[in-house]
Amino acid sequence: MRTAAAAATTTTLLFSSAFRSSTASLRRPAAAAAAAASPGVRLPSLCRTFHAALPSFQSNTNTNSKNKMSNTAAVNRDAVPFQRAQLEGLCQKRFFYTQAFEIYGGVAGLYDYGPMGASLQANIITQWRNHFILEEEMLELDTTIMTLADVLKTSGHVDKFADFMCKDLKNGEIFRADHLVEGVLEARIQGHNMAIAAEQQASSSSGAAGAAGADPAAEKDDKKRKKKVKAVAVKLDQAVVDEYNHTLAQIDNYTGPELGALIKKYDIRTPESGNEVSDPVEFNLMFDTQIGPTGAVKGYLRPETAQGHFVNFARLLEFNNGRVPFASAHIGKSFRNEISPRAGLLRVREFTMAEIEHYVDPLEKDHEKFDDVANLVLSFLPKDIQEAGKTDLVKISIGEAVKTGMVDNQTLGYFLGRIHLFLLKIGINPERLRFRQHMGNEMAHYASDCWDAEIHTSYGWIECVGCADRSAYDLTVHSKRTKRDLVVQQQLKEPKIYDKLVPVLDMKKLGPAFKKQAKAVEEAVLALDQAALEKAQSELKNGKTSVVVGSETVELADDLLKVEKRTIKETVREFTPNVIEPSFGIGRIFYSLLEHSFWVRPEEAAAAGASAPPTTTAAAADKAAVFRGVLSLPPLVAPIKVLIVPISATPQLSPLVKEVSRKLRSANVAIRVDDSSATIGRRYSRNDELGTPYACTIDFASVSKGTMTLRERDTTSQRIGSIDDVVRVIVDLCEGRLDWAGACAKLPEYSGEQAV
């Protein structure tokens, strides 16, 4: 094992930056082949050379395509690999987001959203608010970002909200330990896969060369590519690959010492320098601060919004007339001092969260609307499969998952279904969405069960939504710390009568006997449960008993304390509710949506394919092509819904442009007028990059006939109608009441210029 690990170090060092972000679905060759063969799974651009070399990985972009309308075939974007470099270039060019303080050199993990990014994020949040807060009648909060240290000490964050980091022993560079192990092992597996691909390619290339004459330019290009593969590819024993895969399947389940053992066992070194690293140590992820000028009050920037819900529970319960179940919701900023922020928006230090706290009776976790989602089929990755070192998905309905106990209860299952529907509504590809259950060691300190909605991106499977059963942990610890009852009182249908042991203290004697300690002694006695009271009653028959007060034990004589059996008539049931918490990382969803929506529309410039000489290589033909990026964002979340394009900037068209703009704005449709001197095609193209789903073209015939054309982004097909008819169709499209096929049924096809 050590020898194989050392041999693979060359691969890790040479291509560390490329493979650090390789996808988890490609850890096993079989999984890679299945992913490439599926039209619903894109492969990361970093792995294209490897997959192009394997015949079984070839995909046909013309198969399994779905029509956006009945008579126009749309591009099958699902078969296109992730194109991260082009997408990130588009986001920079169109200012979706950029690194914060860029002109000062920037700060890792901090980003600013530009006009398009801010609008897209706002639209995602609007849909979230409609889907959850309005639909479920949730109580929305807006709580403070600065949080008292005492609150987070009580919740457990001060002691337990940490990751493990390790340090380059020579240059001091810091790494998150689990990410370092994961990145290096994935790089080694990729090197192994590339070595196999190179062997297959060499075999097929030699056969082809013998059968036909080779093009000199193509041969030169092929040799360069082979040289690159040989330089990084290291073939491993299959047993080593299997062990790496088993480790990666459980990477989130390892403790700090276990990660340290893996680093030593596999000879894990820093990607850039190849230096050894230190043993992992804990690092608390919260930003601390001082509240007030004296610094006497310590605080933190909140790591989650949840604690703001819990400290206000009593008021929320009162507002809801003392009844459960009910839910509170919060959308706001949270902060985590990440050890090594990487992968753009996916791991940052300041981010927007949307969190729900659903309060439920621990004895009644059924949900009245469960039937609405029971038949939804989700892709589950349960903890027992992961603990066996596998990543095979289980595709079953939510109803079946709850029935078999894989998902603990109906309320948890209901929210998993609602999360699934929300992500699909805003444009996430369902074939790249799974729900993974947390394993024991990775479970948050407050959770009794937790599922993550993970979205597949070019960076692998990314946790974007967590759905945890926090049990009664938070309300219990805050109640104990503050001595405030954070409980629900429920009137019983029938009184409950039972016998109960009750402590009776002689308060006149207790004060003089214990002085300042008397209050603490009283609280300790009143906190005794029935078993402890039964023991005390037995001991008092001998004249005295003892109780623990703080860190010491005190004795109580039978003249100070008596334990009596009394008949209790209970008309009210008092309980601490359990909490089901769906927690959404808006930034991660934002980026995943961009990757799932982005594709490139290839158009051959000057009919390059037809006019090119016979000796033109595939690489040269690619360079001759013009590539136009498209963001196929759903109208519900697209920053701009409609582009208005006057065919020229002449004053004759200006009044009609203003009229159409006014009608759309009055219907709350976000519009943009592009009356620049660029060609119509160029104006369409740059708004395709913004994700604008529709475009209205106004020409001179529009003035005389009162008509205009409507273009759909993905198919580029156009329809025509009166201005009022087109506006009505646009409003229905943007509000989700109509799809493009329905629009085509309402408006006739447009195939050329209008006659004036």
Image: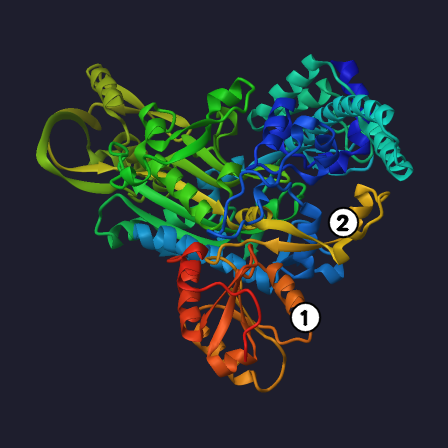
Q: Amino acid at mark 1?
A: Thr
Query: Which quadrant of the structure image shows residue 685?
Result: bottom right
Find disc 1 in the rendering and name its residue.
Answer: 679
* Residue pictured at 67% horizontal, 45% vertical: 83
Q: Quadrant of the image for the C terminus?
A: bottom right
**What kind of element bears circle 2?**
helix
Find disc 2 in the rendering and name its residue.
Answer: 609
In 3D space, how far apart are the residues under numbered discs 2 and 1 (Cα atoms)?
24 Å
Categorize mark 1 by other alpha carbons within 10 Å: few (<14), some (14-19), many (20+): few
Query: Which quadrant of the structure image shows residue 669?
Result: bottom left
* Residue pictured at 27% horizontal, 38% vertical: 371
Q: Position of residue 97 (x, y in %)?
A: 63, 57
**What kind of element bears circle 1?**
loop
Res 107 visible = no
Q: Is residue 126 shown left or right of residue 456?
A: left
Q: Is residue 542 shown left or right of residue 373?
A: left
Categorize mark 2 by other alpha carbons within 10 Å: few (<14), some (14-19), many (20+): some
* Residue pictured at 37% horizontal, 36% vertical: 376
Which of 755/481 is in front? 755
Q: Position of residue 515 (x, y in %)?
A: 32, 37
Q: Amino acid at mark 2?
A: Gly
Outermost residue toward the bottom? 651
Res 147 visible = yes
Which of 183/717 is in front? 717
